[in-house]
Image (cartoon, grey):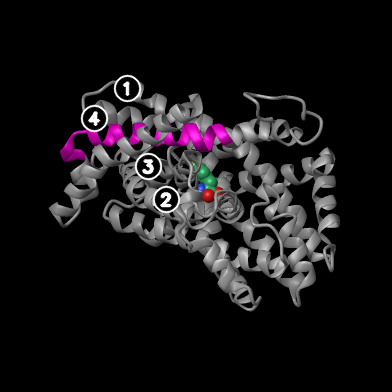
């Protein structure tokens, strides 16, 4: 089993893997979601809990995902099966891979809708639609967009096609080429934007909002949101990182690569917050505006500032790129599985998957117009997909991945796959993975439930 390679190909180098996994991690979660949930949950205290979750839960579980992937060298469904069998357990562990594929479909369907909004705003910023726009008008532009199912459909469709074209190219020609070019672009755009926001005059206020610690602001709900978000933002609990791990060259150190990925992901989220909140405060706007923060508050702010049109364009371009490289990883596990299972080429596999997620996305975008009456557990379809994946399926998937790598896989298998130089470091990882991460995830789940039942 040790010498296996993947039939799908391999990353050219450790750096390409880091870029690809960072591309998966850095997405709408960092730039759209993180700032607005931080705004809704009171700022600093939430950020602190989130950072703890990344370090104590996210990083160890990400290492587990990568090592399972590299050991199995296949799609998460088949890797879970083979690695379980190798350690003398049931092949039904593949169910975890299946749950991941389902979560991938569900995330993709709302992700693509938001990415569609982003594409619409790139175009709008590009032609100067938002110059000197007021708050009411910006709100109207966004609400009109949500109500206009045809426009939503067009942009959603374009995004699905963009993603599927890359995946159809395969690991080397598709994924690798895309991240090689897009990730450096993303970092340059982000730095440009940060430079711009330090010039707004409200940088200190934005900084204070994000890092001022006030425990009173924290609720169990907020802790669950922070935990769920740490999974979402690191693309954990659904096999995306496992799939990327299966293309990882044998000699690459998993521990240091994962630390790098988690560090870059966190950095982008913090920079996005530090770029957005000063702009919000400089224009006297509300940081707790929710999902519309990026689409209503920011265009107004950009519209009123010198150079705002160009920087608004840069901003949405950045978000679009981030969404693109993330969405690719949402569909890679299912694509790899179709290729393995039926021996299909990537092109028909992508056509089938593309159609499925496109149709699901139509249901998600309908939440804002023709399906607005449909409620699932009190949520509209869009919010339901977001809530169930981020706050239930991903943490649950992560919990089982931790339990699997910590308690079911043979210790020598994890040890040889991680190949850490220091036994102390390995033991630290092993203890956190076996005890700390699962207990933290389970406790947050249970405490939240108790709170809800009160
Ligand atoms: N990590 C992505 C983000 O923060 O936007 C979202 C995501 C991508 C989640 C891929 C899960 C995944 F498998």
3D distance between C-alphas at marks 4 and 1: 12 Å
Quarter of the image holding residue 18? bottom left
> Mark 1 and 2 residues: CB-CB less than 8 Å, in contact?
no
3D distance between C-alphas at marks 1 and 2: 36 Å
3D distance between C-alphas at marks 3 and 1: 19 Å
The residue that label 2 is drawn on is 49
Q: Is residue 407 magenta?
A: yes
**Residue 59 placement, left or right of 434:** right
The residue that label 4 is drawn on is 408
Q: Nearer the viewer, residue 115 or 416?
A: 115
Magenta region, mostly helix, strand or loop?
Answer: helix
Q: Nearer the viewer, residue 332 or 174?
A: 332
Q: Position of residue 377 (x, y in %)?
A: 62, 24
Magenta extent: 387-413
Count neighbours of disc 4 (C-alpha within 10 A) and say few if under 14, some if 14 to 19, many if 20 or more: some
**Residue 54 placement, left or right of 433:** right
Quarter of the image holding residue 15? bottom left
Residue at screen point 35% across, 52% down: 55
Instruction: Identify the mark nearer the N-term, 3 or 1.
Output: 3
Count neighbours of disc 1 (C-alpha within 10 A) and say few if under 14, some if 14 to 19, many if 20 or more: some
3D distance between C-alphas at marks 2 and 3: 37 Å
Instruction: Identify the mark nearer the N-term, 4 or 3.
Output: 3
Instruction: Identify the mark nearer the N-term, 4 or 1.
Output: 1
Q: Is residue 204 magenta?
A: no
In terms of secondary structure, where does tag 2 sit?
Answer: helix
Instruction: Identify the mark nearer the N-term, 2 or 3.
Output: 3
In terms of secondary structure, where does tag 1 sit?
Answer: helix
């Amino acid at each position: 089993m040790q010498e296996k390679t993947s039939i799908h190909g391999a990353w050219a180098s450790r750096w390409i893997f880091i870029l690809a996994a960072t591309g998966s991690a850095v997405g709408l979660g960092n730039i759209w979601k993180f700032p607005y949930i931080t705004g809704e949950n009171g700022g600093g205290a939430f950020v602190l809990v989130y950072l703890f979750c990344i370090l104590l839960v996210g990083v160890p579980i990400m290492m587990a995902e990568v090592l399972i992937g590299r050991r199995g060298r296949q799609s998460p469904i088949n890797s879970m099966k083979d690695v379980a069998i190798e350690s003398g357990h049931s092949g039904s562990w593949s169910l975890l891979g299946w749950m991941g594929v389902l979560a991938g479909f569900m995330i993709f369907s709302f992700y693509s809708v938001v990415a569609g909004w982003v594409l619409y705003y790139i175009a709008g910023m590009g032609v100067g639609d938002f110059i000197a726009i007021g708050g009411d008008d910006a709100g109207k532009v966004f609400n009109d967009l949500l109500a206009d199912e045809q426009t939503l459909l067009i942009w959603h469709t374009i995004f699905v096609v963009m993603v599927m074209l890359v995946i159809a190219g395969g690991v080397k020609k598709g994924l690798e080429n895309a991240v090689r070019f897009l990730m450096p672009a993303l970092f340059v755009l982000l730095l440009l934007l940060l430079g711009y926001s330090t010039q707004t005059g409200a940088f200190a206020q934005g900084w204070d909002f994000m890092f001022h610690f006030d425990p009173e602001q924290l609720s169990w709900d907020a802790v669950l949101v922070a935990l769920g978000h740490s999974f979402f933002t690191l693309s954990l609990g659904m096999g995306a990182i496992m799939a990327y791990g299966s293309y990882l060259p044998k000699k690459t150190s998993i521990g240091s690569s994962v630390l790098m990925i988690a560090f870059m992901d966190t950095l982008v989220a913090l920079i996005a917050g530090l770029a957005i909140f000063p702009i919000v405060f400089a224009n006297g706007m509300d940081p707790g505006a929710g999902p519309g923060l990026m689409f209503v508050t920011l265009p107004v702010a950009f519209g009123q500032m010198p150079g705002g049109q160009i920087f608004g364009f840069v901003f949405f371009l950045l978000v679009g790129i981030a969404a693109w490289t993330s969405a690719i990883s949402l569909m890679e596990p299912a694509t790899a599985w179709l290729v393995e299972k039926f021996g299909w080429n990537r092109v028909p596999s992508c056509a089938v998957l593309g159609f499925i997620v496109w149709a699901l996305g139509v249901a998600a975008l309908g939440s804002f117009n023709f399906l607005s009456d449909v409620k699932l557990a009190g949520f509209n379809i869009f919010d339901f997909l977001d809530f169930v994946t981020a706050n239930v399926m991903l943490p649950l998937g992560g919990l089982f991945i931790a339990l699997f790598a910590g308690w079911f896989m043979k210790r020598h298998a994890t040890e040889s796959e991680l190949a850490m130089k220091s036994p102390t470091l390995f033991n630290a990882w092993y203890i956190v993975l076996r005890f700390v991460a699962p207990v933290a995830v389970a406790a947050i789940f249970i405490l939240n439930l108790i709170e809800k039942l009160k």
